[in-house]
Image (cartoon, helix red, strand yellow):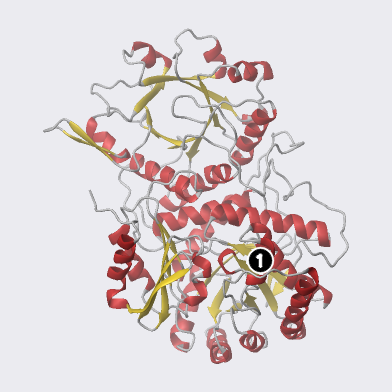
């Protein structure tokens, strides 16, 4: 990396103030209008309008709805000079209605629009990947001298905006997007978190040279794994180079809608917040923007109480937090090793388990033919506690129970026991194939003798189950996994997480944050989700509308577990949609189109389809997708295979059918069963 500045002494050991409890990262204070961001100020929530910026009244009305829902900042797109100029009229009407909430201009390709907006409203957002340089997906070999010359061109074009912002007291977000890195950055660093970081740091260095510091940064990606690595790396690089850290805006770009959008956002945003990283958040859903705010609030409120403690400090991380690598484990049956993570459904609270019960976890029984239909999201194991079953299970499903029920079972090829550590070592009723052993993760400061752990590590039938009752649950489980890894223990790890929240959104966020963040660090060979004695499931009214009617806890947790594995890219079980949240640039009805495409293609397991409202968000932002559906003009769609244009300017009325034909032509289509 080209570094034009001398290094400072690092304040941080890794990338966070603490990896064992929640401790907010100390960032610079930034003033956005009257709103203070960073430092010790609350984590701020924000959203973005989806209306045409030139439709002043509609944009004002939607902005006010977002503010009334709790948005502390509202972003509005300004793709050209005329939209930037109209921000003043929007601002006047919002202020006249009695609202002082800061407004943000969203700029991509037009520096002159940014320079206009910076004189009118409280903050501008620029994307360094396309603010100066035009992306052509060209690879160019630069000498160091040529590379520095290009940076100087960037400096000349960027300086006017910096000077305007400094003069008017306007804040700025330097917002890097994974899919829209410039050709120059891509040629030097590739499509990597380091490329994302360097893209932002080039602009930040220029601003710092002008003594302008009212800056927020972001590292967005539709892939939570890439996103988390990029933010961690950005923190480390700012700490090393500047000796201080600027506030961070968190968000997963193109997260999608419904359950999947919430889970992907919670994994990306929550994983970082768990480590104290993040000063403002936006949940990008393909829904009306006011529905994003309650989800933001549910994420943020997790960090308003007890931060937890009683977890030993980490002397050395046994893995690289900036590059994904799955923890090495030996296989026990289908758990660990190179097997995808397994899903365990907790049915222990049910009074009776019948074949019909299993429909909620992916197994449908047909009594007339005595056969099972097994879905793509069928659980691998069921935990039944002390219950017994009076029917034969489908061949892909196995049982976990307490020792007494296991001992009375006659089928020890599909029935396996679970113990606590001491009980296991003293018990004779073990399985010869697979035993689940619970370890507490510093519950109330408790520790486990290392000699006991070593005995477990020497037993090739043991899967270690990690759980905790600590407030700092994710940090506690991670710390225990680090301890096991440092001891050379290679048994598979099962993550057990209970929720004591109540609404579907709260449960989704809890499960996704506490388990998803661990999977992103390569920790976890299985997942089991459940509810604590104080948890439950309130009516499924989310964000003012019903998006999920939950009558069956088992179905909810089973679907959530598979969605977490999908979002962390550790087990693919369904079609993935990379869908932008819509804005004033969107050239078709994004919500309606996303629903149509999802209905037609949801059976295509493992296929990634990007649905982008305009060319700003594609093809760059859909770099991770297999196929893309992108607005190219009013009522016109362009179809992509990866980054390659396949069909241009298709009428939107026939574009979904054309997409299906493209999938068929490229061998990605299968007929529904």
Vertically, is 3 above or below 97? above
Is 536 in front, or is 583? Answer: 583
- Residue that label 1 marks: 187
Seen as rendered, the residue at the extreme left is 368
Dot 1, crowdedness within 10 Å: few (<14), some or many (≥20)?
some
x and y percent of residue 37 in the render? Answer: 69, 67
Q: Residue at x 36, y 36 (%)?
A: 379
Is 318 in front, or is 218? Answer: 318
x and y percent of residue 553 in the render? Answer: 35, 41
Q: Residue at x 52, y 84 (%)?
A: 97
Is 249 in front, or is 236? Answer: 236
Q: Residue at x 70, y 43 (%)?
A: 19
Q: Is residue 407 left or right of residue 265?
A: left
x and y percent of residue 254 in the render? Answer: 48, 64
Q: Is residue 73 left or right of residue 208?
A: left
Query: Is residue 664 something one can see in this rendering?
Result: yes
**Which element carries disc 1, helix, strand or loop?**
helix
Vertically, is 122 above or below 426? below
Q: To which quarter of the image does residue 408 belong?
A: top left
Q: To which quarter of the image does residue 381 belong?
A: top left
x and y percent of residue 29 in the render? Answer: 75, 67
Q: Is residue 369 left or right of residue 85?
A: left
């Amino acid at each position: 990396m080209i570094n034009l500045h001398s290094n400072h002494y690092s304040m941080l050991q890794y990338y966070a103030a603490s990896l064992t409890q929640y401790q907010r990262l100390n960032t610079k204070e930034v003033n956005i209008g009257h709103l203070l961001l960073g430092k010790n100020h609350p984590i701020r929530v924000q959203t973005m309008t989806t209306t045409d910026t030139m439709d002043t009244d509609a944009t004002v009305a939607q902005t006010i709805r977002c503010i009334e829902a709790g948005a502390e900042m509202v972003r509005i797109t300004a793709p050209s000079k005329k939209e930037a100029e109209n921000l003043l009229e929007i601002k006047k009407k919002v202020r006249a209605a009695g609202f002082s909430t800061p407004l943000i201009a969203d700029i991509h390709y037009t520096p002159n629009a940014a320079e206009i907006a910076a004189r009118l409203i409280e903050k501008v957002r620029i994307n360094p990947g396309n603010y100066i340089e035009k992306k052509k997906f060209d690879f160019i070999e630069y000498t160091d001298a040529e590379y520095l010359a290009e940076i100087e061109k960037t400096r000349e074009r960027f300086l006017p905006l910096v000077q305007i912002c400094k003069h008017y007291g306007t804040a700025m977000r330097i917002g890097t997007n994974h899919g829209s890195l410039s050709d120059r950055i891509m040629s030097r660093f590739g499509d990597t978190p380091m490329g994302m970081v360097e893209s932002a740091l080039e602009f930040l260095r220029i601003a710092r040279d002008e003594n302008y510091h009212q800056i927020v940064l972001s590292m967005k990606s539709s892939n939570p794994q890439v996103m988390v690595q990029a933010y961690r790396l950005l923190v480390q690089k700012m700490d090393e180079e500047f000796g201080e850290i600027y506030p961070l805006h968190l968000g997963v770009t193109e997260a999608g809608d419904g359950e999947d959008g919430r889970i992907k956002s919670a994994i990306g945003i929550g994983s970082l917040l768990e480590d104290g990283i993040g000063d403002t958040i936006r949940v990008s859903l393909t829904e009306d923007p006011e529905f994003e705010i309650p989800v933001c609030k549910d994420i943020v409120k997790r960090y308003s109480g007890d931060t937890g403690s009683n977890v030993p400090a980490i002397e050395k991380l046994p893995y690289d937090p900036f590059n994904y690598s799955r923890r090495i484990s030996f296989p026990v049956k289908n758990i660990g090793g190179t097997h995808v993570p397994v899903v365990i459904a907790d049915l222990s609270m049910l009074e009776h388990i019948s074949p019909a019960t299993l429909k909620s976890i992916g197994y449908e029984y047909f009594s007339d033919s005595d056969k099972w239909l097994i879905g793509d999201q069928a659980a691998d194991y069921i935990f039944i506690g002390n219950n017994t079953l009076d029917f034969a299970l489908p061949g892909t499903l196995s049982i976990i129970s307490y020792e007494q029920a296991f001992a009375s079972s006659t089928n020890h090829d599909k029935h396996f026991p679970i113990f606590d550590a001491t009980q296991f070592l003293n018990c004779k009723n073990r399985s010869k194939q697979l035993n689940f052993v619970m370890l507490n993760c510093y519950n109330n400061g408790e520790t486990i003798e290392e000699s006991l752990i070593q005995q477990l590590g020497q037993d090739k039938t043991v899967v270690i189950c990690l759980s905790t009752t600590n407030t700092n649950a994710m940090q506690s489980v991670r710390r225990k996994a680090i301890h096991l890894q440092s001891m050379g223990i290679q048994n598979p790890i099962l993550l057990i997480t209970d929720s004591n929240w109540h609404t579907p959104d709260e449960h989704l966020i809890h499960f996704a944050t506490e388990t998803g963040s661990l999977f992103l660090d390569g920790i976890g060979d299985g997942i089991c989700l459940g509810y604590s004695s104080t948890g439950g499931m309130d009516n499924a009214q989310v964000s003012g509308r019903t998006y999920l009617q939950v009558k069956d806890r088992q179905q909810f947790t089973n679907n959530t577990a598979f969605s977490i594995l999908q979002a962390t890219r550790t087990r693919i079980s369904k079609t993935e949609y990379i869908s932008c949240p819509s804005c004033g640039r969107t050239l078709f009805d994004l919500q309606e189109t996303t629903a149509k495409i999802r209905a037609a293609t949801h059976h295509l397991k493992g296929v990634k389809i990007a649905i982008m409202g305009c060319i700003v968000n594609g093809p760059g932002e859909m770099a991770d997708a297999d196929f893309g559906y992108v607005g190219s003009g009013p009522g016109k769609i362009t179809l992509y295979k990866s980054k390659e244009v396949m069909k241009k300017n298709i009428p939107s009325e026939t574009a979904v059918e054309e997409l299906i034909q493209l999938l068929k032509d490229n061998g990605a289509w299968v007929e529904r069963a």
